[in-house]
């Protein structure tokens, strides 16, 4: 086997399939060609953030006004990417892949990012699972229950989400440097599956998370062109959906579509990460502090404007506009479930009426409710005809408008419990966790802990007049840790990394400087 990489883990049979000599050669070529530029792009992120911290605000770039105002379209969409009315998302462990492919949906986003804890075994097995899904006939028998799972007829269209550009893969180094997780995920999924997918008359489809600038989209476009040329494939064999889930990116949507015009299929409202990014990007701006996360909903002016502008921009250019995540989990209590489905129905109706072409759910039990809105409720495969010409007045001030609402002790305590339980699960290898009736992933944990950090940073007060301080947070953290310990039981508390999560949550929430992503210090503690 080649020695192009240094692995911190021994390669078992599955890992050897992923890192064959041929695969290593292509991955090394990608990394040597594109990692230096990626490092520069990440440095530019830091420079932009320094400007925001000094008082500047994100805005539309006057230097690219001609791209926003000129007449152009993306490459025509392939037939199987024109109908994406309902998509389910989830991690790449085998049982969940099968359940997602069998759900009553059009597409399944298999997630190597926010809903996947990046353990070495998890990432290796995830690639094998998606290979088997593309081959067809995938099965799984649960070792604890003995229950058998099998992918049925007409599974959902599979789209893989790679890790964000900021995330390294520490278990694999080249020339003494950790390789980018995004390039590893992209390359291995492509190499394992492109021939099988082409034989089935489809392409290789990806979701790209957390882009902040069109220069990052251009980097991905160059990766895609390089790969297609290397394997003698037609341009546009690789198609991507970009999540608009950072505040800077909402001002770059035309430019992102233009940079990726040969490979883009859609933009998506990654709304939970977008709220997190609003907090993080504007962390130094005391006049833009958000209230309890529970009240920051899509009917708030700054979020509704983001949804409408995304639809308008995409449809002007021939791209689909995907809606955001319904994170609710159906309840076994009929009365409670009725309330949940009513909330989901209202949320998805708003998205459909804004002109979105499809939307996301985290649980298959929501599929029927959402299909009433996004399948029965629209004519045709999509809403590309909805041009939203009336929305010419969406400007910087509306997109950055602060959100009304209270900061409450109950909201703060809920944020603490959610963050603590999610971080413990993530450190334990689970990136997608049901907590208090919601399917939580890294994005919602990020909102929870950065919200508190921002309240502390700007000396905000709770609705009862109590100042939010580090001391108050530390006190509430200890109290809520006892609540969680009672909820999960002492045995589970001691057997899972709750104490480790407690220390990590305290460190990042009381730090003087905001930690960009909890997954970065968390990853240092992950096997």
Image (cartoon, helix red, strand yellow):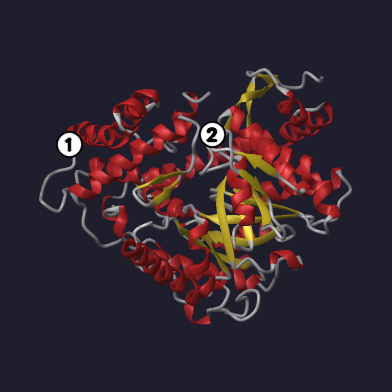
Q: Residues within 10 Å of mark 2 (few under 14, many from 20)?
A: few
Residue at the right extreme, as displayed: 232
Confirm or deny contact between disc 1 and disc 2 (CB under 8 A).
Answer: no
Asked whether 187 or 36 is in front, the reply is 187
Horizontal side of residue 515 vs 196, given as left or right: left
> What residue is rendered at 35% in x and 39% in y?
419
Q: Where residue 443 appears, x then y in whole percent?
A: 44, 46
Up the image or down, 48 lies above or below 290; here it is above
Residue drawn at x 72%, y 28% is 14
**Residue 384 pos. (x, y %):** 62, 76
Looking at the image, which residue is at 23% across and 43% down? 413
Would residue 208 be found to the left or right of residue 55 on screen? right
**Residue in view at x 52 percent, y 67 percent:** 368
Of residues 225 and 503, the one drawn nearer to the viewer in this rendering:
503
On residue 144, the disc is 2
User: Which quarter of the rendering shows the N terminus?
Assistant: top right
Q: Estimate the x, y position of residue 393 in percent, counting from the top left.
A: 44, 76
Give left or right: position of 32 versus 230: left
In the rendered view, does 394 fall on the left or right side of 508?
right
Task: State whether residue 251 appears in this view.
Answer: no
Mark 1–mark 2 distance (CA, rounded to whole Å): 43 Å
Dot 1 falls on a residue whose secondary structure is helix
Which of the 4 quarters of the picture holds residue 27? top right
Q: Is residue 306 above or below residue 243?
A: below
Instruction: Quadrant for residue 423, please give it.
Output: top left
**Which label belongs to residue 472?**
1
Q: Is residue 2 above or below residue 96?
A: above
């Amino acid at each position: 086997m080649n020695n192009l990489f240094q692995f911190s883990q021994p390669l078992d049979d599955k890992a050897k399939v992923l890192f064959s000599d041929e695969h290593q050669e292509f991955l090394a070529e990608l990394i040597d060609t594109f990692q230096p530029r990626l490092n520069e792009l990440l440095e530019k992120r830091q420079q932009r953030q320094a400007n925001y911290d000094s008082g500047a605000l994100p805005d539309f770039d006057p230097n690219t006004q001609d791209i926003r105002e000129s007449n152009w379209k993306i490459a025509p969409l392939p037939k199987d990417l024109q109908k994406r009315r309902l998509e389910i998302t989830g991690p790449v462990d085998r049982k969940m892949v099968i359940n997602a492919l069998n759900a009553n949906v059009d597409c399944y986003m298999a997630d190597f990012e926010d809903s996947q804890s990046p353990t070495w075994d998890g990432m290796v097995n995830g690639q094998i699972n998606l290979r088997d899904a593309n081959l067809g006939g995938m099965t799984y028998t649960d070792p604890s229950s003995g229950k058998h799972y099998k992918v049925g007829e007409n599974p959902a269209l599979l789209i893989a989400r790679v890790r964000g550009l900021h995330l390294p893969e520490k278990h694999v180094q080249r020339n003494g440097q950790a390789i980018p997780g995004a390039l590893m995920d992209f390359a291995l999924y492509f190499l394992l599956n492109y021939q099988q997918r082409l034989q089935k008359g489809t392409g290789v489809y990806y979701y790209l998370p957390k882009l902040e600038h069109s220069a990052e989209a251009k980097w991905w476009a160059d990766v895609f062109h390089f790969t297609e040329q290397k394997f003698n494939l037609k341009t546009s064999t690789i198609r991507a959906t970009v999540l608009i889930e950072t505040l800077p990116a909402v001002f770059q949507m035309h430019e992102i579509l233009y940079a990726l015009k040969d490979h883009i299929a859609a933009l998506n409202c990654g709304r939970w990460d977008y709220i997190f990014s609003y907090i993080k990007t504007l962390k130094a701006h005391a006049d833009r502090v958000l209230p309890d996360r529970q009240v920051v909903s899509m009917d708030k002016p700054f979020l509704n404007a983001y949804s409408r502008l995304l639809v308008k921009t995409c449809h002007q250019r021939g791209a689909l506009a995907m809606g955001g995540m319904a994170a609710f989990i159906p309840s076994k209590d009929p009365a409670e479930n009725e309330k949940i489905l009513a909330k989901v129905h209202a949320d998805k109706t708003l998205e459909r009426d804004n002109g979105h072409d499809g939307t996301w759910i985290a649980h298959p039990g929501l599929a029927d409710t959402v299909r009433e809105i996004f399948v029965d409720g629209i004519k045709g495969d999509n809403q590309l005809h909805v041009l939203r010409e009336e929305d010419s007045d969406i400007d910087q001030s509306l997109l950055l408008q602060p959100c009304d609402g209270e900061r409450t002790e109950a909201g703060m305590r809920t944020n603490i419990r959610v963050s603590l339980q999610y971080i413990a699960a993530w450190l334990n290898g689970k990136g997608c966790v049901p907590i208090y009736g919601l399917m939580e992933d890294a994005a919602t944990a990020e909102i929870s802990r950065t919200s508190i950090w921002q309240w502390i940073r700007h000396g905000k007060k709770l609705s009862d007049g109590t100042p939010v301080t580090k001391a108050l947070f530390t006190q509430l953290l200890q109290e809520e840790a006892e609540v969680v310990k009672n909820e999960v039981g002492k045995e589970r508390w001691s057997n899972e990394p709750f104490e480790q999560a407690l220390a990590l949550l305290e460190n990042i929430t009381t730090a003087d400087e905001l930690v960009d992503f909890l997954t970065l210090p968390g990853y240092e503690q992950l096997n």
